[in-house]
Amino acid sequence: MKVLTISQNELKNLSHTLLSMITKDQFTIDMVIGIATGGIYISSPIKEQLAKEKWHGKYYEIKLSRQSTETKKILKLKGILTKLPYFILNFLRKLEVFMFENFKAKEYNSSKENKVDLSDGLINDIKNSHSILLVDDAIDTGSTILAIKNVIKRINPNVTIKTAVLTVTHKKPYIEPDYTLFKRVLLRCPWAEDYKGNDKIG
């Protein structure tokens, strides 16, 4: 498993590459939904590129916290992580994936769907949509993107939903994306706690 450190500029280029893959597949998009935090830095360049092509669809950003992210906040590792060399940080990232892969539940737990809070405007637009693109930076266990997909399907059972991420980190996630650029690759992006570039977000 590799760990790649991605700058903001590289992130934008990868987002455009992901959109090119989707366009080549001839998937017509009525709505783009970016999943915060990481997903919005992928979905935003996609939206901007679509706008240049005279796209008139809907765009939304929603948030559903991941357990690993909350754990890092609880441990208050931000100050420590930026002081460690990347080879140690890479080891810690790989260790985190190993732990999650080996101790996660074998079956998807739908209780996470209770945390999906959609605005009235978004719910109404979902009801009137034919095709939705769900965008995130990565699929780890896949529980976040699957929870959101299931909630959307309950709102509009007839809508076509496709998922796009930059990378899939786990061997057997609960859901496989329709579009991805990497598999078994960890991306260290500018919003990450252990990112040390000058273009760090947040």
Image (spheres, rainbow, N blue to C red):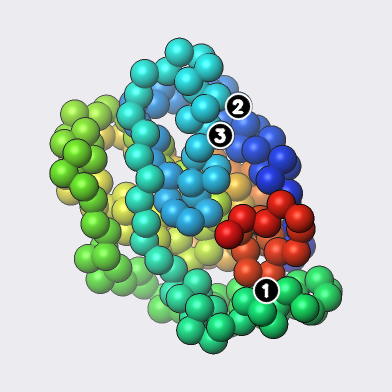
In the image, farthest residue toward the top: 54
The label number, if any, that marks residue 138 in the structure image: none
Point out the image quarter for the C terminus: bottom right
**What residue is pinned by disc 2?**
20
Instruction: Locate residue 5: give its quadrant.
Output: bottom right
The span from disc 3 to disc 1 (Cα, nearest Å) is 26 Å
Residue type pointed to by label 2: Ser
Could you tell me which secondary element the residue under label 2 belongs to? helix
Residue placed at 69% from the left, 82% from the top? Answer: 80
Residue type pointed to by label 1: Arg
For marks 3 and 1, the one nearer the N-term is 3
Q: Residue 116's x, y, as percent?
A: 27, 59
**What residue is pinned by disc 1?**
93
Q: Residue 125's x, y, as percent?
A: 21, 33
The label number, if any, that marks residue 45 in the structure image: 3
From the viewer's perspective, tell me whether residue 174 is left or right of residue 48: left
